[in-house]
Amino acid sequence: MTVQDFIEQNNLQVFTQGDIGEEISGCYIGDLLSLAMSRVVPGNVWMTVQGNVNIAAVSALCEPSCIVLVDGRVPDEETKAKGKEQGITILGTELPAYELACRLYEKSR
């Protein structure tokens, strides 16, 4: 499944757009940035409630396919600007991380 498919199937809000043709290979759910740096791998969807500019820094290091802010969280303006500058796809949803991860799993089977 591509990021574009994931967006469309889950009606995700696009805050910034990078390569939405990228394939998704899994996901990581977590809000502790230091742990995310060691667990997120290229191709992952990273689901978090963090909306500050530090998620862009972690994304630059780990290269997830996209970041999804769950539970109705939105990125601040600095994060949006950094995401656009670095070509990071930052998405949003009202769904909790668990429900979105379950949807991702079901669609990828």
Image (cartoon, rainbow, N blue to C red):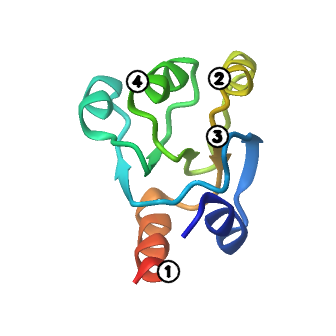
Amino acid type for the residue under numbered disc 4: Leu
Sequence order check, earlier mark of 2 and 4? 4
Amino acid type for the residue under numbered disc 3: Ile
Where residue 47 appears, as percent x and y from the top left, is: 46, 48
Q: Residue at x 50, y 39 (%)?
A: 49
Is residue 31 left or right of 23 when viewed as pictured? left
Instruction: Note whether 14 is above or below 95 in the view shown.
Output: above
Q: Which residue is mark 3?
A: 90
Amino acid type for the residue under numbered disc 1: Lys
Out of 104 and 93, give the one closest to the viewer.
104
Sequence order check, earlier mark of 3 and 4? 4
Q: Residues within 10 Å of mark 1 (few under 14, many from 20)?
A: few
Mark 4 secondary-structure assignment: helix
Instruction: Note whether 104 is above or below 12 in the view shown.
Output: below
Mark 1 secondary-structure assignment: helix
- Labels 4 & 1 near each other (Cβ < 8 A): no
- Residue 82: image quadrant is top right
Out of 75 and 21, give the one closest to the viewer.
21
Q: Which mark is residue 61?
A: 4
Where residue 109 appears, as percent x and y from the top left, is: 40, 84
Q: Residues within 10 Å of mark 4 (few under 14, many from 20)?
A: some
Q: Residues within 10 Å of mark 2 (few under 14, many from 20)?
A: some
Q: Which residue is mark 1?
A: 107
Mark 3 secondary-structure assignment: strand
Q: Which residue is mark 2?
A: 86
Q: Residue at x 50, y 32 (%)?
A: 50
Cα distance between the residues tagged 1 and 3: 20 Å
